[in-house]
Amino acid sequence: MKKGEIWVIDSGNSSGHEQSGIRPAVVFSGVVAGLVMVVPLTSNSRALRFAHTVQLSPTTSNGLTASSSALIFQLRAIDVKRLEKKMGSLTADELKLVNKEIKKMLSV
């Protein structure tokens, strides 16, 4: 797995407002100690009302089937065992948008 790839992940059970269950996510780091950083995705368009989100359109290269929001504010580490299937990859421009939003979020 590489930065910018989109994988189906099983984020397990979460509580409160955390994203949970089986969903696509953007890999944002290499593997460190069996963990990888991911940005979960949602097809719920209402998520764009939150700060630190990026809209992604479905393409053959990214494997998405619906317009999705990258929930940058929910960046998290998961065990690589939770990565189930590679769907595709972001374009260089999409990855730049995600990088920009992560930097913006971390500088607040």
Image (spheres, rainbow, N blue to C red):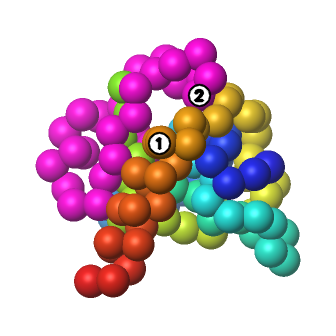
Q: Tell me if residue 103 comes above or below residue 40 in the rendering.
A: below
Badge 1 element: helix
Q: Residue at x 24, y 34 (%)?
A: 45
Question: Badge 1: few (under 14), some or many (20 or more) residues near its Cα, within 10 Å?
Answer: some
Q: Which residues are magenta?
A: 41-66
Compared across the picture, whether 106 is left or right of 35 comes to: left
Q: Quadrant of residue 89?
A: top right
Q: Residue at x 52, y 48 (%)?
A: 95
Query: Residue tagged by mark 1?
Result: 94
- The kind of residue tagged 2 is Asn
Badge 2 element: loop
Compared across the picture, whether 3 is left or right of 96 comes to: right
Q: Tell me if residue 88 comes above or below residue 75 in the rendering.
A: above
**Which percent across, then down, holds residue 51?**
21, 60
Query: Residue tagged by mark 2?
Result: 62
Q: Quadrant of the C terminus?
A: bottom left
**Which percent across, then down, holds residue 21?**
54, 45
Q: Determine whether label 1 and label 2 are within 8 Å by CB.
A: yes
Residue 5 colored magenta? no
Residue 50 colored magenta? yes
Point out the residue furthest to the bottom here.
108
| Alpha carbons under labels 1 and 2: distance apart | 10 Å
Compared across the picture, whether 93 is left or right of 17 comes to: right
Q: Tell me if residue 103 comes above or below residue 18 in the rendering.
A: below
Q: Quadrant of residue 7?
A: top right
Choose between 45 and 56: the one closer to the eye: 56
- The kind of residue tagged 1 is Glu
